Image: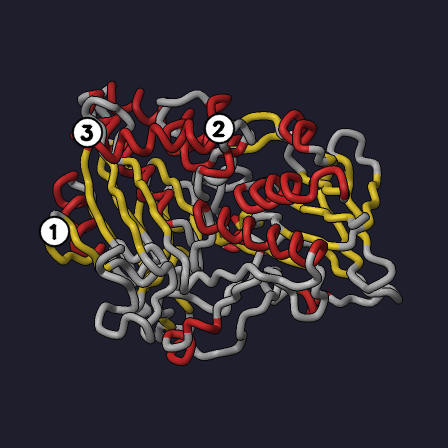
Amino acid sequence: MAKVLVIGAGFAGHTAALYLGDKLGNQHEVTVMSNRDMFSYIPSWIWVGVGHMKPEQTVFKLKPVYDRMGIKFVHAAVKEIHPDAGDQFVIGEEIETKNEVRLTYDYLVVATGPKLNFAGTPGLGPDGGYTHSICSLPHVVKTRDAYFAAIEKMKKGEKVRMVFGTGHPGATCQGAAFEYIENVHKDLVKKGLRDKADLLWISNERALGDFGVRGIQAKYGGKPMSSEDFISAVFKDHGIRSQVQTGVTSVDEKKIYWENYEGEKGETEYDFAMLIPQFTGQPVKYIGKNGEDVSEKVVNKPGFVLVDGIYGLTYDVLERNPDAWPSAYQNPTYQNIFAAGIAFAPPGPISKPHTNKNGMVIAAAPPRTGMVSGVIGRVAALNIVDLITKGRMTHHERMSEMVAACIASMGDSLWDGSAAVMVLYPVVPDVKRFPTESGRDSFVSHMEMGISGAWMKFMLHHTFIWKFKAKPGWKIIPE
């Protein structure tokens, strides 16, 4: 009987666990270790952040789902991984008792998600800092409450300066910040307070609408348009100011400090700020048979798990080599270790990085969340099933072969709300297959905006929670 251990229960880890439980059944042992006992549907937190959805509508308990699937659940935080053959185990700390727990494995899926590196930007974050976040449920509840306080100021006639975007030169998840600023705009319009708020978008993107994926060249209304043109038009229509090509360096109680592509240093005064932090790998120790540190064989310097990609390429070379991206998500040294979602190390950025005259690298990190996380979680799980049942892997899907759809909410109302629907294929541009189309298939890649998108976003909330609860028909709902 094989023992499969999944660490983490977000989009990637939970998806992997469901497929492993479904395929391996009672013939093998599948265990999930997670420091959270709830699954969180993160895409709907932008609605929690403006008070349009209750926090409890975005979460559910994991153990009842795993019990039905024949999966063991351990509520613990991973501390150490001992990957050497013949003595493979993980040490964690139980959340409730603080007791040490030791789990052995034959196959391991690392899907721990990111460490929110607020410390990478002095003054950033809601815990000991001055800014807000929508990257965890406790943080988004704090953000909602701070937003409500700002509304009360506006009702008294005060002007409030609000800043949204990325809080580190190497941050990612611009899409979530974009959704939040747009939902704040819509909410303020409906409350009759929009004239009392100055909304500023500040981001490390090379251009508006880059989102860390080199932007999108697609059709909008049947005509070719770039995501830069698309988002610029939205911001102009909504009276949102923007400042891209900017890396936030520190924050204090009154000001955000930054550098831009030209190396200019500046500061922006604010009253309310929601800035996405840098994501790094979780601080896990990797220990060899004799107690030595073997982390260099498993993770890169930021702590992301090395897999079957080609690392060390310059951006210019990587840009022309879509096959450098991993396909099986398997560690080359310890081939029974797989990584999924944000936990895997990409071979480099998708959007071109920039180093300014001061030596600061300003680069939107490649996003590996949501749909992409789910797909990779499925691929990793099915490869482990292959190895157990067939002795060889048959599932391969690079991000340079993957389609992704993003529905960015711009107001949740089903009567006068809106959403931007963006489809890109592939996620990582492939200039070999699509040399005249900026590396993407212009027939598949698409952008639209309207109330139908708001309905789609609402339906996805319920559809995917159904899927993640492993209810009847869950496998026919795509990742």
Element type where label 1 sits in the image? loop
**In front here: 140 or 265?**
140
As measured in the structure, the alpha-carbon distance from the residue carrying label 1 to the one carrying label 2 is 34 Å
Inspect the image, locate mark 3, and give the three-letter code of the amino acid beneath it. Arg
Q: Which residue is mark 3?
A: 194
**In front here: 324 or 50?**
324
For image coordinates 60% across by 52% down, the residue present is 382
Inspect the image, locate mark 1, and give the three-letter code of the amino acid beneath it. Gly
For image coordinates 68% across by 59% down, the residue present is 390
As measured in the structure, the alpha-carbon distance from the residue carrying label 3 to the one carrying label 1 is 32 Å
For image coordinates 32% across by 39% down, the residue present is 179
- First along the sequence among labels 3 and 1: 3
Q: Which residue is mark 2?
A: 466
Residue count near mark 2 (Cα–Cα under 10 Å), binned few <14, some 14–19, many ≥20: some
164 horizontally vs 127: left or right: left
Coordinates of residue 458 in the picture (x, y in percent): 34, 28
Element type where label 3 sits in the image? helix
Element type where label 2 sits in the image? helix
- Mark nearest the camera among 3 and 2 is 2
Inspect the image, locate mark 2, and give the three-letter code of the amino acid beneath it. Trp
Mark on residue 222? Answer: 1
Residue count near mark 1 (Cα–Cα under 10 Å), binned few <14, some 14–19, many ≥20: few
Residue count near mark 3 (Cα–Cα under 10 Å), binned few <14, some 14–19, many ≥20: some
Coordinates of residue 413 in the picture (x, y in percent): 26, 24
- First along the sequence among labels 3 and 2: 3
